[in-house]
Amino acid sequence: MGCWKWFDGVLKQAGIEVNDANRRRIDEVIHHYIGEQAGYGRCSSDWRKARKDIQASDQMKNELIKRLRSVA
């Protein structure tokens, strides 16, 4: 299972449809973002917990959406 599946709602808000061509890049963007934010202490490095942290923060959600839109 790709880690992006935990972020289905954020992907929908970003207007991203996951397919074979962009799946790997989506994984990379989300992985990098969570690693970066966990390093700053803004969210957990655990993807399940990070998803909740990001969904609870409009700022973090918008930052991730902006990065994901670069994939499209």
Image: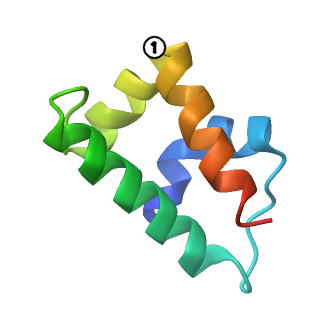
Q: Nearer the viewer, residue 15 or 32?
A: 32
53 or 39: nearer the viewer: 39
Q: Position of residue 61 (x, y in %)?
A: 55, 28
If the image is split into quadrants, where does the C terminus sit? bottom right
Is 61 situated above or below 22?
A: above
Residue 19 in the image, given as x and y percentages of width and height? 76, 76
Label 1: how many Cα within 10 Å (few below 14, some 14–19, many 20+) = few
Q: Secondary structure at mark 1?
A: helix
Q: Determine the residue positioned at 32% across, 39% down.
A: 48
Q: Is residue 3 above or below residue 62?
A: below
| Up-down relation of residue 49 to residue 19 (above or below) | above
Quarter of image, res 31: bottom left
Please report the residue visible at 21 percent of the width from the left and 44 percent of the height from the top. Answer: 46
Asked whether residue 1 is in view, the answer is: no
Question: Is 56 on the left or on the right of 16, as rendered?
Answer: left
Residue 41 sits in quarter: top left
The amino acid pointed to by label 1 is Ala
Name the residue carrying label 1: 56
Count how many numbered circles sit on residues in the image: 1
Residue 2, position in %: x, y?
A: 47, 68
Specify whether 11 is left or right of 49.
right
